[in-house]
Amino acid sequence: MAWLNGTGAAVESGALVIAGDLAGVASTRISAGSPGTLKTEGVYGLPKVPAQAIGQGTRVFVEEGLVTINPIAKDDETANVPVGVAWAAAAAGVGSVHVKLNV
């Protein structure tokens, strides 16, 4: 999907990006203010909250740039954006999880 980087900072290739209600992964590095492409389908290794264990098939969300199992933000009780489901389990202490996007 085409996306205009309005974040004010460059987005690195492979980074998780939330565009409205869709999760995407940057196809290439996208400079601030520039257009780029987000992959919105498929399975990608994404950074997660290291303290959390995530089971295979668990619905996951994003909070502060990290994949989490928490649907509600810890600081302000607003909803975290859904990202997809864990494609494989990831133990506590591990820094990433494979996620199938937008399912």
Image (tube, grey):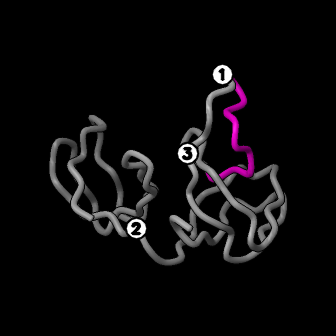
Query: Seen from this angle, which residue lies furthest left?
Result: 34
Is 48 situated left or right of 16 in this image? right
Question: Label 3 neighbourhood size at 10 Å, few (<14), some (14-19), many (20+)?
Answer: many
Disc number for residue 76: 1
- Decide: is 26 above or below 75: below
Q: Earlier in the sequence, mark 3 or mark 2?
A: 2
Disc number for residue 37: none
Q: CA distance from mark 2 to mark 1?
A: 27 Å
Q: Amino acid at mark 2?
A: Thr
Disc number for residue 40: 2
Disc number for residue 81: 3
Pointer 2 and pointer 1: residues touching (CB < 8 Å)? no
Q: Amino acid at mark 1?
A: Asp
- Decide: is 71 above or below 22: above
Q: Amino acid at mark 3?
A: Val
Q: Which secondary structure type mostly characterizes the magenta part of the structure?
A: loop
Q: Position of residue 79 (x, y in %)?
A: 62, 35
